[in-house]
Image (cartoon, rainbow, N blue to C red):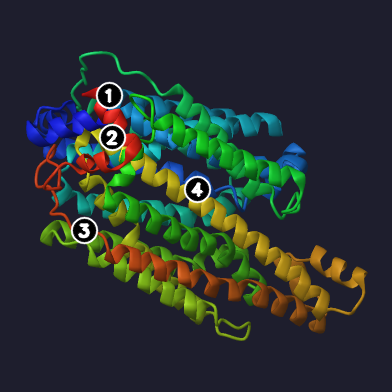
Amino acid sequence: MTDDTAAAAAEHSGSTIGADAGEDSAESMSRGAVLWVFVGLLVAMFMFSLNQTVLATALPTIVGELDGWDSMLWVSTAFMLASTATMPAYGKIGDLFGRKPLFIVAISIFILGSVIALFADSMAMLITGRVFQGLGGGGLMTLSQAIIATIVPARSRGKYMGIMGSAFAVSSVAGPLLGGWITEGPGWRWAFAINLPLGALALLTAVFLLKLPHQKAAQRPRIDGGGMMLIVVFTTCLVLLSAWGGHQYAWTDPVIIGLGAASLISAAVFVFVECRVTEPIVPMSLFADRNFTLCTIAGVFIGVAMFGVLSYMPTYLQMVHGVEAARAGLMMTPMMGCVLIVSTSIGFVVSRWGRYKIYPIIGAVVMGTALFFMSRMHPDDPAVIPIAELAMLGAGIGLSMQLLVLIVQNSFPVSMVGTATASNNFFRQIGATLGMSVIGSVFTARLMTNLAEALPATANGAADASAQLTPAKTAELPAPVHEAVVSSYNDALVPIFLWVVPLLAIAALILLCVKEIPLATRVGQQGNTRTTLENSSEVGCASSASAGAH
C-alpha cells in the first residue's frame, strides 16, 4: 500500500493502520503513563540537542589529551553528519514497521556511542563513538516528535510540543556552558557519562510504559534502500562542503566544487528515484501540501538565524566584552529563559484556544527585529544591551520553532506523521548547517580583512594578531592593538546579522500563506478537512505512483 492510498483510506474509512493505532494507543495508555512517556521523550530530545553543542568548550582539552588537532573538525562533523543523514530513514521506517522498537534501537545505539566515546583513548575511537551517537541521535529527535503525535491529539499536543521546543533550545544554549563546567571540574569524559543515566531513563519508559499497537500490513513493505543511500551521499557532500568551504579549502578549490556538484547530482537522482519507488523515504507528494512546504521553508530560515547566533555570540561576548567563557554562557541564559517561558506558554495557549497561525508569524518578526538591533551593536555598549537583544531573539524562537512542527503534523494522518516530521527536521537541519557555514566563512574573511587594515601595515603584524585571537590573549594585548582587534571582530560579525533579517522577513510572508486547519481533537484524526495527500494528484510524479498503486 502506498502513502497515497493509505492517506485516502484514512480520510474516507478511518481504517488505516495509523489511525487505528493512534486511537488504540490513546485508549491503552493512562494519563500518568502518557506523562511518564513524555518525560522519556523529553530526555531523549535533550540528549540529542545537548550533544550537538556540549563539546564546543571541551574540544581544546580533548584534542590536547588525545593528540588530535588535525582531526578536531570530525568530532563535531561526524555527529552532525550521521544524525542528519538518518533522520528521514527513522521517520519512514517508523511509519512502516512501528515506532516503539525503532525508538528503543535508537536509544541503545546512542548509549553505545556514548560508552565508546567515554572510554576513548584515541581520536579515532572518539570519532567512532560520535558516529554511533549521531546514528542514534537522528532517531531520538525524529521519533520523539512522531511518538508524541501518536499518543496525544493535535489540539492537546501544543503544550507538549512547546515544552519539547524549550528543552531543545535550552540544551542547545546550555551545552557550551555545561561542557565548560564539566571540563574544568570532573573532566570532559563526564560529558558522555551523563548520557548513561539519561539514556537508561528514556529506555525504561519506552520499554515498559509506551504502548503502541503492532502495525500489520497486507504485504511486507519494500524499504527504499536506493533513496536512503542517495540521501546519505547528498548529506555527506553537503555537510563536508559546509565544514571545509572557506576554512580547510577555498570556495573555488576543486574539492569544494566537486562536493557541490556531487550534492546537486545526488539530489537530482534522489528526486528521480523517489518518484518511482513504492515507499519513498521522502515522498515528493509531501510537497503537494501547502502547509508542509511553507513551514519547511520558513523553518530553514529560522534555523539559519537561530544557529548562526548560537554559534558566534558566546565568542563575541568573550572577545568584545572581555568576559570569561563561563560568564559568556551565563549571559546567554536570558535567551534560554525566554525560549523556555514563551515556548511553553504559547503551547498551552494553542492547546486552550486551538488557534496557532499568528504566533509563528509574530515570532519571525520578533526574531528579525532582534537581529536588526543586534546588527547595530558597538564594542562600547554595556553588556545589558546584547543580553536584552538575545532575550528578544529567544522570545521569537519560542513563538515559532515547535509550532511549525505541530502545523506539519496536523496536516497528515498518523500513518505518515513520522515521515512528515522527519522530512521537516531534515531540511531545517540542512538549512541551519549551510547557514552557519556561510556565516562563519564570511565572518572569517571579513575579520582577516579588517585586521589587515586596522593593524600596522605589515603582513606579520596582522598574522601575529590573528594568532592571538583568544579572549585571554586578546585582553593582554597593548591598548591600541586590543582596540583594533575588538573593533575588527565587532565590525566583522555584527553587520552579518542584518543580512539575515531579510530571510526572517521572507519567513513571515511565507507563514502568512499557511492555511489554519482546525487542530484534531483526538488521536488518529487528521486535522485537515480532506486528505492532504489527495493534492498529490496535482504533482506528476506523485500521481503516477498513486495510479500504479490503484
Image quadrant in which the N terminus is located: top left
Q: Is residue 236 visible?
A: yes
**379 left or right of 417 in image:** right
Question: What residue is shown at x 28% (from left), y 56% (from top)?
Answer: 403
Among the 4 quarters of the image, the one containing residue 445: bottom right
- Return the residue at label 2: 543
Does the residue at mark 4 contact the one at mark 2 (Cβ under 8 Å)?
no
- CA gap between label 4 and label 2 equals 28 Å
Question: What residue is shown at x 13% (from left), y 58% (from top)?
Answer: 354
Q: What is the three-letter code of the residue carrying label 2?
A: Ser
- Return the residue at label 4: 430
- CA gap between label 3 and label 2 equals 23 Å
Q: What is the three-letter code of the residue carrying label 4?
A: Ile
- Return the residue at label 3: 515
Among the 4 quarters of the image, the one containing residue 441: bottom right
Q: Can residue 189 be seen in this view?
A: no
Task: Count residues near mark 3 (Cα–Cα under 10 Å), then give few for <14, some for 14-19, many for 20+.
Answer: some
Among the 4 quarters of the image, the one containing residue 6: top left
Q: Where is residue 144 in the image (x, y as percent from the top left)?
A: 32, 39
**263 left or right of 507 in image:** right
* Between discs 3 and 4, the one toward the N terminus: 4
Image quadrant in which the C terminus is located: top left
- CA gap between label 1 and label 4 equals 32 Å
- Mark in front: 4 vs 2: 2
- Mark in front: 3 vs 1: 1
- Return the residue at label 1: 548
Give SS at disc 4: helix
Q: Where is residue 464 in the image (x, y as percent from the top left)?
A: 87, 67
- CA gap between label 2 and label 1 equals 8 Å
Does the residue at mark 3 contact the one at mark 2 (Cβ under 8 Å)?
no
